[in-house]
Image (cartoon, rainbow, N blue to C red):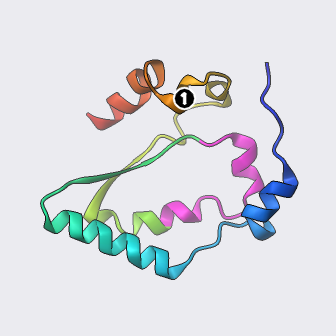
Amino acid sequence: MTHNPLNQENLGKVFPNHRIQFDPKQVRQLDAELGKLKSDGITAILLFTPSRRDFKSAISNYEEYKLVVDQLTNKCSVIDLDFMVNDSIFMDADHIACPTSYTSNFIRPALK
């Protein structure tokens, strides 16, 4: 069983030149929100969920967006599950809804 190939036209609309675009205003807003949560005594957890291998390879600066978030990690915990799985999980809709196996096998252990 295989998943559908990426739609290159749609990919180009969302990611011009196959790059994630960083909006400094959005980064500042995320930083402010994380700062507010921290000052309110709330521990924020940012979770990088898995992405398909073909998607990661189609985006030339895929890892850079993680670096942007990593710069803000003094205000939150970051859990990166993106490297822990292979593309076979995308054949099971459970990875999206997370009610059973994906939550039990990946998310809960990462939170401990």
**In this picture, residue 105 sits left or right of residue 49:** left
- Identify whether 36 is placed above or below 4: below
Inspect the image, locate mark 1, and give the three-letter code of the amino acid beneath it.
His
Number of other residues with Cα within 10 Å of mark 1, as a class: few under 14, some 14 to 19, many 20 or more? some
Instruction: Write the start and end of the magenta stretch as one range.
Output: 51-67
Give coordinates of residue 98: x percent, y percent: 46, 28
Image mark count: 1
Give coordinates of residue 38: x percent, y percent: 19, 64
**In this picture, residue 72 sits left or right of residue 54:** left
Which residue is painted at 80% across and 24% down in the image? 2
Which quadrant is home to the N terminus? top right
Q: Secondary structure at mark 1?
A: helix
Is 35 inside the magenta-drawn segment? no
Give residue 87's quadrant in the image: top right
Q: Which residue is mark 1?
A: 95
Is 56 inside the magenta-drawn segment? yes
Give residue 10's quadrant in the image: bottom right
Give coordinates of residue 93: x percent, y percent: 60, 24
- Identify whether 55 is placed above or below 100: below
Which quadrant is home to the C terminus? top left
Which residue is painted at 30% across and 37% down in the image? 111
The residue closer to the viewer here, 5 or 64, is 5
**In this picture, residue 36 sits left or right of residue 70:** left
- Identify whether 47 is placed above or below 68: above
Which residue is painted at 35% across and 73% down in the image? 31
Which residue is painted at 39% across and 32% down in the image? 107
Give coordinates of residue 34: x percent, y percent: 29, 66
